[in-house]
Image (tube, rainbow, N blue to C red):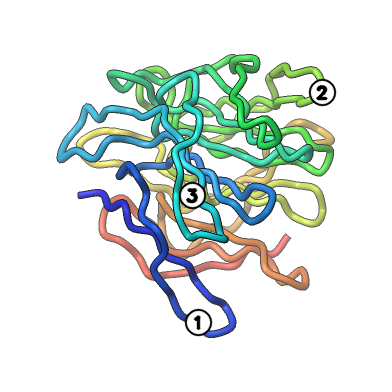
Amino acid sequence: KASSAAEIYHPKTNTWTATGSLNIPRDEDMVTALLPGGRVLVAGGYVPAAAPPFTPLASSEIWNPKTGQWTMGRSMHVARGESTSVTLKNGNILVIGGEGAGGTALKSCEIYHPKTDKWSYTASMHYARFDEAAVVLHNGRVLVAGGGGASGQPITRSEIYNPSTRKWTRTGSLHTPRSESEYAIVLMPNNKVLLAGGYNTLGPTETDVNTAEVYNPKTGHWTQVASTMSASRSGHAAVLLNGKRGVLVMGGARGPATATTDIFHW
């Protein structure tokens, strides 16, 4: 059962404290973004349910750090769960794809404008996808890779969004289909992008992978990393370490969960 509870982590004391609860319980890869003034946006996700098909949400809420409370915001144009979102360099929030009503993979994208508290459509992707991985490149463009496609199976397709022209262009495909790796895509100091793990087959038992790939914005191509991770994993997370110490990849697995971690050195 999904919870509406929210908590705050305090790094200095290594403790958690409760804050105001969401107005609507929601789960599964909702939109989350830090807004000006320390406010937090949450949008979309699914209505809590025991089994699919899940009902996606279009509603949004904003948390106010001064009051510790959530207030309802404007709704997205499309109800979507399992979507991906990134903060553009102009401060706007790009929401990408996801699953719509009936579990249909979406091509549509929209933008939240914090200054006006409004949502607007932008160009749709070339390929419908959910659980995709997305990252803002150093030039401000957005790379989107993999995810589950229109058939529900993971795909290799990648494309790039240009905020200036509000258009999508195709770029190099992954060597391995990958979904559920949306929290394991990292922009590295050398301007290249690491995408690690994910699952490449959806069925009664998902097949997780222990491989990774690196995208080069200059060539528009993905290169497979020669070494593999210590465990196959999906639904995992990765973070760039300070001091150019590498990318830490941790946890995951859609089968038995793993506590293992790996560090990638570029």
Q: Height in image: 26 above or below 104?
A: below
Kindly report the distance in space between the C-alpha atoms of the residues bearing marks 1 and 2: 41 Å
> Where's residue 69, x and y in %?
45, 55
Residue at image coords 31%, 61% = 257
Q: Residue 165's image quarter?
A: top right
Q: Between label 2 and label 3, give the one nearer the viewer.
A: 2
Q: Amino acid at mark 1?
A: Asn
Q: Residue tagged by mark 3?
A: 197
Of the image marks 1 and 2, the number of the one nearer the N terminus = 1
Which quarter of the rendered picture does the C terminus lie within?
bottom right
Looking at this rendering, what residue extends furthest in the front direction? 67
Q: Residue tagged by mark 1?
A: 14
Residue at image coords 40%, 50% = 235
Left or right: 114 in relation to 234: right
Q: Between label 1 and label 3, give the one nearer the viewer.
A: 1
Q: Amino acid at mark 2?
A: Ser
Question: In the image shown, does 84 or 41 lie closer to the viewer?
Answer: 41
